[in-house]
């Protein structure tokens, strides 16, 4: 996405009262974007922005200068990882970047602590096929735990082996199981009421969970041709929500989504 498109969408969203920005990517990692910090600085130039962040594996954080990274105004970072050695990391993520990730994670935590914790760094420990006590006793796990207030041991003890398979696009290791497909008729997914996703090509979707090509029926238009207000308050999004709520149609891409959120949004009047 070019900076001109980003600035147009940010300016429009500011007029709509948006105060939260998530540099979410459907496929990939925000740290692979060479313009990430420039984009972040522009978003944070508006006083009404209260929080801004992204999810990452941190495999490419070393590409950024730490002073510049902290100065751009991120308030949170979610890190997906394992902390029990290179072998289990490769088994889950399929790449040999454990040492890079670990060094980046330690650097981020230490810098954040030295600066008075301006960021909330949330670490998500992914399930691995080994005894939970073995994970918790691993020296890398213990080192990371010493640098964060988050109770990582409790997370590991609660962890199960059900994960999202991204609509079948991700081949899961044998020890993992896909999340169940919960019933969803008459109850639109909560995500349809949270906000829109703006793709790198300018298309705007009602949700970006599994729309890898920005080509599903959840696409509401594009920022080059429509305003965000028009798309958020428009007939297309209202039709998607109404058809789902009344049982006429659940969008095909949503019918097999394992990230379906059954919570009832205040803006949704479900039966």
Image: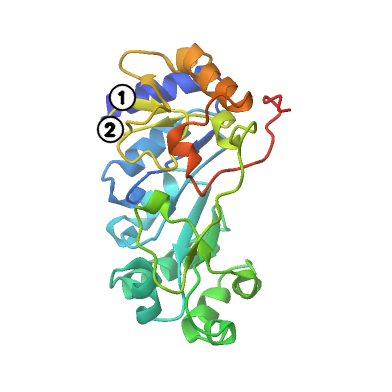
- Residue 107, image x, y percentages: 42, 67
User: Nearest the camera: 204 or 238?
Assistant: 238
Label 2's element?
loop
Label 1's element?
helix
**C-alpha span from label 1 to label 2:** 7 Å
- Residue lying at 65% horizontally and 70% vertically, measured from the top left: 158
Say above or below: 130 vs 60. Answer: below
In this figure, which residue is indicated by the disc labeled 2? 1
- Residue lying at 32% horizontally and 70% vertically, measured from the top left: 100
Q: Is residue 114 visible?
A: no
Say above or below: 185 vs 18. Answer: below
- Residue 68, image x, y percentages: 36, 49
Label ID, residue 5: 1
User: Nearest the camera: 211 or 13?
Assistant: 211
- Residue 92, image x, y percentages: 39, 70
* Quarter of the figure with residue 270: top right
Q: Is residue 238 visible?
A: yes
Q: Residues within 10 Å of mark 2 (few under 14, many from 20)?
A: few
Residue 90 falls left or right of residue 11:
left
- Residue lying at 51% horizontally and 49% vertically, measured from the top left: 258
Q: How is the image coloured?
A: rainbow
User: Nearest the camera: 117 or 81?
Assistant: 81
> CB atoms at circles 1 and 2 under 8 Å apart?
yes
Quadrant assignment for the N terminus: top left
User: Nearest the camera: 22 or 210?
Assistant: 210
Say above or below: 162 vs 261. Answer: below
């Amino acid at each position: 996405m070019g900076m001109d498109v980003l600035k147009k969408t940010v300016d429009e969203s500011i007029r709509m009262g948006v105060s939260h920005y998530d540099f979410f990517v459907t496929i990939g990692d925000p740290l692979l974007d060479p313009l990430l910090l420039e984009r972040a600085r522009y978003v944070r130039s508006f006083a009404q922005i209260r929080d801004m962040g992204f999810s990452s594996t941190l495999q490419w954080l070393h590409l950024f200068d730490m002073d510049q990274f902290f100065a751009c105004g991120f308030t949170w970072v979610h890190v997906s990882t394992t902390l029990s050695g290179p072998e289990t990391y490769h088994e889950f993520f399929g790449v040999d970047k454990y040492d890079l990730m670990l060094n980046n994670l330690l650097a981020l935590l230490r810098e954040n602590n030295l600066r008075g914790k301006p960021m909330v760094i949330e670490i998500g420990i992914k399930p691995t096929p080994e005894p939970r006590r073995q994970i918790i006793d691993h020296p890398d796990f213990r080192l990371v735990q010493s640098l964060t207030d988050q109770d990582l041991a409790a997370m590991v003890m609660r962890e199960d082996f059900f994960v999202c398979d991204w609509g079948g696009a991700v081949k899961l290791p044998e020890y993992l199981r896909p999340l169940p497909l919960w019933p969803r008729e008459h109850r639109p997914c909560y995500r349809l009421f949270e906000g829109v996703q703006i793709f790198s090509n300018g298309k705007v979707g009602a949700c970006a969970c599994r729309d890898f090509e920005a080509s599903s029926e959840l696409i509401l238009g594009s920022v080059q041709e429509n305003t965000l207000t028009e798309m958020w308050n428009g007939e297309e999004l209202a039709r998607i929500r109404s058809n789902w709520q009344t049982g006429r149609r659940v969008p095909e891409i949503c019918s097999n989504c394992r990230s379906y959120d059954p919570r009832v949004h205040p803006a949704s009047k479900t039966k």
